[in-house]
Image (cartoon, coloured by chain):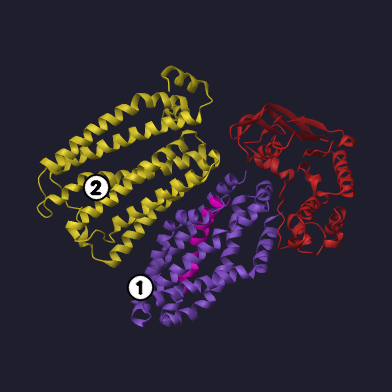
Chain colours: A purple, B red, C yellow
Amino acid sequence: MNYRSYFKAEWMSLLRRKQDTLNALLFFVMVITLFPLGVDPSADFLAPAAGGIIWCATALSVLMAVEGMYKEDYNDGSLEQWLTSGLSVTFLVFLKVLAQWLMVVLPLLLVLPLLAQMLFLPMSVLSVVMLSILLGTPALFFIGSIGAALTVSLRRGAVLMLLLILPLYIPVIIFATGAVRAAQMEMVYSGQLAILAAISLVALTLSPVMAAISIRASVN
Amino acid sequence: MNLQLKNLWIERGERDLCRDLSFSVLNGELIRIAGENGAGKSSLIKAILGWVHLEAGNLEFNGEDVTQHRDMLLQCQLYLGHTPGIKSVFTALENLRLYCPQASEEALEFALDQVQLGAFVDTPAAQLSAGQKRRIALARLWLTDKALWFLDEPFTALDVKGVDALEQRMSDHLSSGGAIVITTHQPLLSLAPKVIELVA
Amino acid sequence: MNWTWFHKLGSPKWFYQWASNWGGRCVYLGLMLLVIGIVWGLAFAPADYQQGNSFRIIYIHVPVAVLAQSCYLGMGIAGFVALVWQMKLAPVFIKSVAPVGAVMAFIALVSGAIWGKPTWGTWWVWDARLTSVLVLFLLYMGVIAIQNALDDQVFADKAVAVVSLVGVINLPIIKYSVEWWNTLHQPATFKLTEKPSMPMEMWLPLLFSALGLYLFAAGLAMWRMQSEVLKRERKANWVKKEVMSHGV
């Protein structure tokens, strides 16, 4: 195994399980649909709340996608092969999260314009929402991968993983919706986006190390 | 190559799997770890590879402390456990290619042929039995250049013909200077193993 | 600098004996200071000219809230020590302190709510500090939950260290983000605790109760760590001797 063959295989296996990606996307759409139904379908409520709704749905779908990301690798012994491959487990984690991110976020960005219409989000703000998702979701994926690695050996790890990880998502959600709100009020939003990018960069460098430690501890 | 295990003490829960266990693995040597089910044969291999905790003891590989320089050991070895990392979404050939990216198409097919999977090259692993999946992993032994092998019960997935082929491959590996640490109930007398007995 | 104390901390036996000397003293001295501080604060300190007597809850609320944060900081440092130097006592520290910190965060939330009712008119306000204490409480629950979910000691120790360390790295970011979010939402008129200066008669009892609570919690943590050390080192000879000489 080397890094290239691993990334290729990971990408291919994600492509073969298209249904998983589709499910994450459907879940995203479903959560968004709940808000007009559950709270208020009028444009007066939805337009200002759209950024927050989209981001809550994004965070939840990312958690869903990330939660089981090592499950199969744990059960079929791939993680044991990671640990004995002589390759850096940290970098393997990085590659895996990267593949997952591409597979979930790109389709999500594609359906976003449609959903934005349904939430009465002004077209001018849509680009900011997409930019915030592009810059903010890497943090969600990388932080989530730590929780997934910690709970991979547990049969019912999903809720525990949510409890561990969701509080850490708060800053990303705050700054992302802050950027969207600023854009809606026609104020400067580059500061919030810069902070989002910074959080993602920190998560991207530190999380794989933590996830690798957790994987090493999980496999025994 | 010189792997030294000195005074290993491994615990599982409240039970000692071994205490003060010492042995060495040198070029051309076959080490058979024997013992009943649950005696801790797999755990011993996992402890050498570093993911079962050592209560006490020293591991040295080529004179270097393994706990400090684990990569040196990992670069030189190949480990096949009970679940050897075979993905069900891939075909037999694709699975093998993931682990042996340098090997040519012919080499991959040849290796699969050695473990009686010649007819299943393009079959998704999801449609193969557990034993067949393990045989995909065993095919790696025909493609690897790693000197030290750790094999956990490799024979359970094989029929008589497969056992012969694997014993032949192991004997070739040993005579070319490699070393093997294996757990198995098979006595392997033709290969003259050094036996380490674990008592449950 | 002399590092022997650091290396001694690596020895559970040394710690056990040290804690037997200091644990009790910390608890009793701390309790004494705490009682003095609280009685002084509740009964004798002058009333606040704005909030009247309701401000007196700070003699409980503030020490508890500060301690809740300090505990998590300590756990994060211990997590780092556990992962980098594999010190045996670091996971013991995390395991022993987490429930103490969680209780402190909980008391801080409840006392904050009680304080909020007369001053703000509601039990809960999405104030920056309240929100970040709520998040802190959730982080504590995460540490405790993963500790309980994992049976394997070695694994549980690693997991708890990772969670604490990741939490501590995130804590300032969370705090900053919540504060930033809060100023965006509402003007800062609610910040009543930050007065430019507090008269000495109000401030001294606060110092007493804070100091007392810290000592009390430190002693409590030592006691908890001691029993955890005994459990983990049950096979060591010194533990057998210790149990024999004191009885069970």
Residue C139 visible in the picture:
yes
- Residue designated by label 2: C61
Q: Which residue shows up at 38% across the image and 64% down it?
A: A174
Vertical arrangement, residue A22 with respect to residue A144, above or below = below
Front residue of A75 and C94: A75
Of tags 2 and 1, the one toward the viewer is 2
Front residue of B173 and A30: A30
**Where residue C58 sits: x, y (%)?**
20, 47
Magenta part, dominant SS = helix
Q: Quadrant of residue B103?
A: bottom right
Query: What is the residue that sits farthest to the top in this orientation?
Result: C245
Residue B100: mark in rendering: none
Amino acid found under the numbered disc labelled 2:
His
The quadrant of the image that shows the N terminus of chain A is bottom right
Which span is picked out in magenta? Answer: A130-152
Vertical arrangement, residue A205 with respect to residue C36, above or below = below
Vertical arrangement, residue C199 with respect to residue C221, above or below = below
Task: Based on the picture, tell me whether residue C183 belongs to the magenta stretch.
Answer: no
Q: Is residue C105 left or right of residue B23?
A: left
**Where residue C156 sits: x, y (%)?**
52, 42
Vertical arrangement, residue B18 with respect to residue A31, above or below = above
Front residue of A162 and B179: A162
- Residue designated by label 1: A182
Q: Which residue shows up at 40% across the image and 42% down it?
A: C98
Q: Is residue C159 left or right of residue B49?
A: left
**Where residue A143 sits: x, y (%)?**
50, 56
Amino acid found under the numbered disc labelled 1:
Ala
Q: Quadrant of residue C36?
A: top left
Front residue of C231 and A2: C231
